[in-house]
Image (cartoon, rainbow, N blue to C red):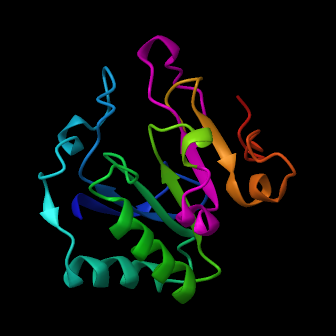
């Protein structure tokens, strides 16, 4: 897996104070994407032990609520296995921290991925410039959904996602 940045003390990409891993690789290529530099799966830096250590040092801090995976697309084929392995390790080491994940894919297409058992909140859907709204919380366009993954997976019909309680729009 490759990545472009690790953002510390972030308050824009999920609930609370977070660390954000911006992975490389995205096939959605949304018009007016806020981060097109992350589209190339061969771009950025190799995610090595030093990068992992940097993430874990942030997660060790008691005031950090959790981690957000963004990019790029953490569910891009070039990322999926490494992201799953990292998320599994994070959830085991930091069970009290929340894990958010942004993807251009739809919930209905990714809900069966094994890593979903570790995700707390999924922001799904491609960014759509004609539905852009700067007043939305944690998403860029109104077609995107902020999904409470664990509550959704408990439902008899998980095809219908439960929206995160603070997703007002």
| Camera-nearest residue between 103 and 7 | 103
* Residue 52 lies in quadrant: bottom left
Image coords of residue 36 (percent x, y)? 23, 35
Residue 124 shown in magenta: yes
163 to 33, vertically: above or below = below
Judge from the rendering whether residue 66 lies leftward or rightward of residue 48; answer left or right: right
| Camera-nearest residue between 91 and 12 | 91
Count of labels in the image: 0
Q: Magenta stretch?
A: 111-138
65 to 71, vertically: above or below = below
Residue appearing at x 45%, y 20% in the figure: 128
Residue 152 shown in magenta: no
Residue appearing at x 27%, y 38% in the figure: 35
The residue at the far right in this view is 156
Image coords of residue 87 (percent x, y)? 47, 72
Residue appearing at x 24%, y 59% in the figure: 5
Judge from the rendering whether residue 68 lies leftward or rightward of residue 144; answer left or right: left
Image coords of residue 45 (percent x, y)? 13, 63
The residue at the far top in this view is 130
145 to 48, vertically: above or below = above
Which quadrant of the figure contains the N terminus? bottom left
Which quadrant of the figure contains the C terminus? top right
Image coords of residue 144 (percent x, y)? 57, 31
Residue appearing at x 32%, y 52% in the figure: 77
């Amino acid at each position: 897996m490759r990545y472009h940045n690790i953002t510390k003390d972030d308050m824009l990409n999920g609930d609370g104070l977070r660390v954000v891993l911006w992975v490389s690789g995205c096939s959605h290529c949304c018009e007016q994407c806020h981060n097109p530099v992350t589209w190339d799966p061969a771009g950025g830096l190799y995610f090595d032990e030093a990068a992992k250590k940097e993430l874990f040092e942030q997660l060790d801090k008691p005031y950090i609520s959790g981690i957000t995976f963004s990019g790029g697309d953490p569910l891009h084929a070039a990322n999926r296995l490494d992201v799953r392995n990292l998320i599994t390790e994070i959830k085991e080491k930091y069970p009290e921290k929340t894990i958010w994940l942004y993807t251009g894919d739809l919930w209905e297409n990714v809900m069966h991925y094994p890593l979903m058992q570790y995700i707390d909140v999924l922001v799904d859907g491609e960014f759509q410039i004609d539905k852009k709204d700067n007043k939305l919380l944690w998403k860029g366009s109104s077609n995107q959904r902020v999904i409470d993954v664990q509550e959704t997976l408990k439902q008899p019909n998980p095809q219908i996602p439960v929206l995160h309680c603070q997703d007002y729009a």
